[in-house]
Amino acid sequence: MTRSLPRSLHPVAWWVWALGLAAAASRTTNPLLLALILGVTCLVVASRRGDAVWAMGFRYYLIFGAFVVTMRVVFRIIFGGGSSEGEHVLVNLPTVPLPGWAAGIQLFGPITAESLLAGFYDGLRLATMLICVGAANSLANPKRLLKSVPSALYEVGTAIVVALSVAPQLVESVLRVRRARSLRAGPQKGVGAVRGIIIPVLEDALDRSRALAAAMDSRGYGRTGDQSRASRRITGALVIGGLLGICVGVYGLNGTAPRSLGAPMLLGGLALSAVGLRVSGRRVRRTRYRPDAWRAAEWLVLSCGVVAMGVSFFASSLDANNLNPSLDPLAWPQVPLLASLGVLIAAIPAWATPPPPPASMSEQVAPVAQVAAGSASLRAEEMVPR
């Protein structure tokens, strides 16, 4: 097989892949399958992550995931003691009495193995989903993701992209400020270093916000075309009617509403919403310079994520016991072969996709201009009491 030239894949493909793995993780509490999902995610990120600054924040998602698992277990110890969950008591902690208005809540007490495992399984599942989102943030360029948002959803898309790019931007600011601090004398570790980093990072975030607002305003971002009041009302009615149809259809498919209304209402709602978004998008005038290409590699990445999600949903309907190990009675988790096969398919992009190109000079971790900007932002450090 010929080696592909380096290029950046479409960000939507990476997001669909990551959300597919996150959906697969949401269907199971099996620690073996969750560990496999984490392994596949880390493998793909390590193989296809670029060297841009926004791609360097994946390790922070791993740290945050470990924090989530730890806190879930700690909460089980503090608030789960004395519960009737499980018979294998590991530690018998003294119970802390609470006033009458806090009836039903008990602090500490007997800690059972079943309670700790339940907290660990739930925390690991949540941490795996967060790490999958972190993988999407490390693989997909947030600026290019904003270009891919449909015109009708540009306002919502802007808010979502800005929210998703908060963590990469903070990581970039921290790296730049730390590099600038290394050129100066002062504490490099400990509380003093943390205090000397926080204020420059906050100042840098404010400067970025002002620069972004000025750039968007100068380019006429958010300018809308002429649209009559009747057209706006028709568009709003189509979108609201479509959303109501989708809600009724989902309730019907779940058995809450009559099942005969489920599929028709869902399809009708999707059709009305698509028409409403299409009509609404006409009022937004937006041009694209060099649109991102969608090629076979993007289809491969998207298909791997969808297959991992679909196989996991199908496996949960066939063998739910292996995907959710029993806690009463305690049982060793078994490897679910079908779901594991679907997750392993999601690892194909680590070899079958083009490698990422080197970052441009504006995205490098420490070009001279950014070091100078980081040094300038350290003026706020002088305000920190020593």
Image (tube, grey):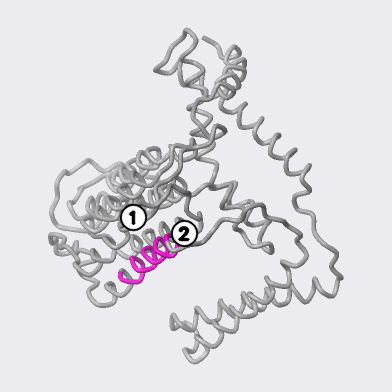
Name above or below for residue 154 compared with residue 318.
Answer: above
**Eye-nearest disc, 1 or 2:** 1
Residue furthest to the top: 185
Q: Which residue is mark 1?
A: 2
Residue name at image x 75 percent, y 50 percent: 221
Identified by mark 2, the residue type is: Ala
| Closest to the observer, 8 or 312 | 8
Classify mark 2: residues with Cα within 10 Å, few (<14), some (14-19) or many (20+).
many
Residue 29 percent coordinates (x, y): 27, 60
Q: Is residue 134 magenta?
A: no
Tell me the SS state at disc 1: loop
**SS at mark 2?**
helix
Residue 159, x across and y down, in percent = 63, 51
Q: Which residue is mark 2?
A: 13
User: In this orientation, which residue lies closer to the viewer: 85 or 211?
Assistant: 211
Q: Is residue 185 above or below residue 334?
A: above
Counting from the top left corner in percent of width and height, residue 53 is at 49, 35
Label 1: few (<14), some (14–19) or many (≥20) C-alpha neighbours in 10 Å: few
Location of the N terminus (image quadrant):
bottom left
Relative to 47, residue 274 above or below: below
Q: Describe residue 10's horizontal placement relative to residue 320 as left or right.
A: right
Residue name at image x 13 percent, y 54 percent = 88
Residue farthest toward the bottom in the current orientation of the protein? 260
Is 304 magenta? The answer is yes
Three-letter amino acid code at disc 1?
A: Thr
Does 72 sit above or below residue 361?
below
Q: Main secondary structure of the magenta part?
A: helix
How far apart marks 1 and 2 lie (CA) works out to 22 Å
